[in-house]
Amino acid sequence: MTKPMTPMSRRATLALGAALVAAGGADLPARAAAPKRGGTLVIGGALSLRHFNGAIQSGSATALPSSQIFASPLRFDSNWNPEPYLAKSWSVSEDGLAVTLNLVTDAVFHDGQPVTSADVAFSVDIIQKNHPFKTMLEPVERVDTPDPHTAILRLKHPHPALILAMSPALMPILPKHVYGDGQDIQTHPANLRPIGSGPYRFAEYKPGDFWALERFDRFFIPGRPALDRIVCRIISDYSVVTLGLERGELHMTPFLAGVRDIARAERAPNLTVTPKGYDGIGALTWLAFNTQRPPFDDPRVRQAIAYAADRDAIVRRILGGKAKPSFGPLVSTSPFSAPDVEKYALDLDKANALLDAAGHRRGADGTRFALTIDSPAGQPELGRNLAEFLRVQLRKVGIAAEVRLAPDFPTWAQRVSNFDYDLTIDTVFNWGDPVIGVHRTYLSSNIRKGVIWSNTQGYRNPEVDRLLAEAGVERDAAKRKDLYQQFQRQVVADAPIFFIDEVPYHTAYHKGLGNVPETIWGPMSPLDTLYWENPPA
């Protein structure tokens, strides 16, 4: 027996997560075709990527092109409502242990081969084995394929986050006939020349410079996509990005977080700047510790650094007061957020006492020990400026910090994912439901060398593992909330991470663009309806 899928608010989607697997989906009305076909969209930003395969790599730089190249079972609107995509309809069994996807019958991959249920089963298996979000599809025991257009996901227990996990950025459907040829999926040549069934097909890629996509004329939604071509210029300096926007050389930049860059874009007469489209992301900036490396294996040292960091000054001075401070693993807007965690307000006396107690006395020159702060490429406020501020703060408690700036994302990711760091600044997403985007950072079972945005802190706490395991399957909203609040208090006390702020992401775009995505996944949504209403001269 199944029930019809009903619209759900963001709060209902999270707090009543079990409802997502207790309800089914009926056919939803087809959306109108995008107007005014033609033109090129030029995107700019610090969007350096290793490859295009979102089934094995998370992050905004990969998700943006991956969501154009690959289609997924479902997509979501701005109110957290699931909508048909490759699955024209879906249903979920009363006990929540079977999810049936009824696929469209006319979808083909970019090489002309049909999309079938076998591709869905293959993709789920690839994601389970390779994606850094290990808990996202963990309950799926198998995918049955009774016919080419029906896929049934069989679960070992109800999974509150499963419907959300079928989003474009999280569950791209790969062609089995391409990726299932026996080659290692991590190094498969198709990762750099991908073939999907999304609205745009791969055209060209020059690492560190640009990538380009072109319209797929056999896309299964009639009349889409609208644009002829999408080009992304990879530019790490956002002052260059904003200048390019002002001049009309760039047409859009997503994930704009620098407060000065946002303010500058807002003053440009040819641009619109909006914070809409990031509800599902829940981005946090934090300072992560390599807990596998002394002296950061001692929670007293981590706590001392947190007390010395001065979050209030960071938010007020570096981020211009535009960002919300962050105090724990979940964004403040989550119904599971715990307000009663230790805030680690500035307290140099407490920091010094903790370092003394941990056995790190000052030497003759006043220094206790040295460390390196790694910073990824990207927004200067959230990278270089923040790292330099922390370096000065730590000197006040006798810690000599050196700042190591990565020239690009792949370099930084290689260092951090292989535990070749002391402390690093990072921006990490909640991804809507804690099962998807939060568990991965703290579960000891997700310490995976070489996989960025897994548990790259090397953090282990059996109590945290237990709490997350229970919360991930709990169907009672109140009990689930209590489990997540216990989890947050424990993690903040252990301090494998010092939480800094909730990232104030914005999208800046040319005023001539129409249908700029403002869904919960924003720029990580398919851009199939985005079009030029008034192209730049």
Image (cartoon, grey):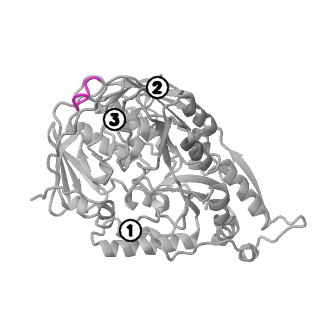
Q: Position of residue 388 (x, y in %)?
A: 73, 53
Give the spatial CA distance, label 1 vs label 2.
43 Å
Q: Position of residue 395 (x, y in %)?
A: 79, 62
Residue at x 69% of width, y 51% of height: 385
Considering depth in this image, is 148 or 389 the residue closer to the camera? 389
Residue 199 lies left or right of residue 28; in this view the side is right
Q: Position of residue 428 (x, y in %)?
A: 51, 53
Structural crowding at the residue carrying mark 3, measured as other residues with C-alpha within 10 Å and reported as few (<14), some (14–19) or many (≥20)? many
Amino acid type indicated by mark 1:
Pro
Question: Is residue 373 something one can see in this rendering?
Answer: no
Residue 106 lies left or right of residue 61; in this view the side is left
Q: Residue furthest left?
A: 1
Q: Nearer the viewer, mark 3 or mark 2?
A: 2
Q: Position of residue 142 (x, y in %)?
A: 24, 50
Main SS, magenta residues: loop
Residue under label 3, please give it: 70
Q: Could you tell me if the residues under marks 3 and 2 are in contact, i.e. CB atoms within 8 Å?
A: no
Give the spatial CA distance, label 3 vs label 2.
29 Å
Residue 109 lies left or right of residue 537; in this view the side is left
Q: Nearer the viewer, mark 1 or mark 2?
A: 2
Is 103 colored magenta in this rendering?
no
Considering depth in this image, is 152 or 425 the residue closer to the camera? 425
In the image, which disc is placed on residue 335? Answer: 1
Quadrant into which the N terminus falls: bottom left
Give the mark nearest the N terminus, 1 or 2. 1
Give the mark nearest the N terminus, 1 or 3. 3
Considering depth in this image, is 90 or 531 the residue closer to the camera? 531
Residue at x 35% of width, y 22% of height: 38
The region drawn magenta spans 217-223
